[in-house]
Image (cartoon, grey):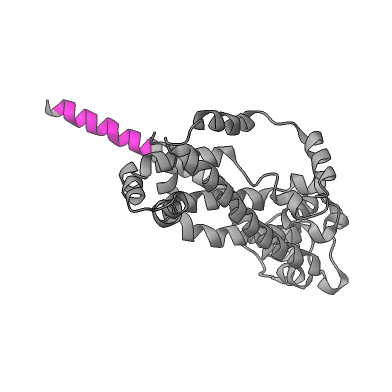
Amino acid sequence: MTSTTQISKRRAGMADWIIVIILTALCLTCVLPFVHVAAKSISSNTAVMAKSVALWPKGINIDAYRSIFRDGQLTHAMIYSVWMTILFTVIGLALTICAAYPLSRKRLRGRSLFALLLMFTLYFSAGLIPEYLLLKQLGLLNTMWALVLPLAFSPYNMLIMKTFFQSGIPDSLEEAAFLDGASNLTILTRIVLPLSKPIIATLCLFYAVGRWNAYADAKYYITRKALQPIQYLLSNMILSSGSDAISMSESAAVVSTPEVLQAAAIMFATVPILVLYPFVQKYFVQGVMIGAVKG
């Protein structure tokens, strides 16, 4: 009996080590490229051109960041992208809450049909050309709204929030509020939303990261440089090569090589999400588990 127990413990220990090794390898595949780019962004031009920079910077040099901050195009694109992402997240959360809360309540007649119609768009869409023609007819091309409104509502996020409302908000709370004369809007704002901070923080991160990383729609709907988000400029910068990789104003006084500037621009565009994530991390796992597993 004792030997069997020891063998079981040994097998469990080996399994734990295998899991740790696999998770460590997966984490390294995510972290090491980021560290490499960060190291290149503050390394000297000579070291980067010689391909001698791996995970530690060589010849500390922040001229690339100075050029970025002096360049009006990138700084404007950063401020514009931050404002657009905040607006997109607020609108997206408002639409998601307004759709998920009624569909999670049994007293809504026909809620199954409404849910089916909304979820239908998760699997089928009209396509890029009809969407472009629609935005053109609405006069939204070359406006910020072309980047905000089409993706503002996510059926997947609505499903997660709907599941949370169904499993995390007891019906007894609403029944007691109704007896006290509370309206649906009062129940939503005074009871449901204060109890839904984890899922709100989770979806806030989903919406913000999704909008921040998107650039394909800007390629299709935006031609004015003043309305191009920073991710679109970064995409053009990386896809270009040679001396044409960086297009900056003369006031930027570019003294870095295109590869160093590309690395610095990547870090420059990544900082806002890195700053946001620690504030919602404690809600992130809790919201995903409650919203996606229960029910």
Q: Residue at x 17, y 25 (%)?
A: 4
Quadrant for the C terminus in the image: top left
Quarter of the image for residue 291 reads top left
Closer-to-camera residue (99/277): 99
* Relative depth, front residue between 102 and 234: 102
- Which residue lies at the image location 64% right of the left edge and 32% below the top edge? 121
Q: Is residue 6 magenta?
A: yes
Viewer-side residue, 77 vs 122: 122
- Magenta range: 3-18
Judge by depth and name the residue closer to the eye, 37 or 158: 158
Judged left or right of residue 197, residue 228 is right
For the stretch drawn in magenta, the main secondary structure is helix
Q: Classify the position of the N terminus by image quarter.
A: top left
Residue 217 rendering spot, x and y as whole percentages = 76, 45
Give the image location of residue 130, x and y in percent.
80, 34
Residue 53 in view: no
Residue 113 seen in this snapshot: yes
Residue 90 within the segment the image draws in magenta: no
Q: Position of residue 53 (x, y in %)?
A: 66, 57
Judged left or right of residue 167, residue 108 is right
Q: Residue at x 79, y 62 (%)?
A: 257
Q: Residue at x 45, y 51 (%)?
A: 188
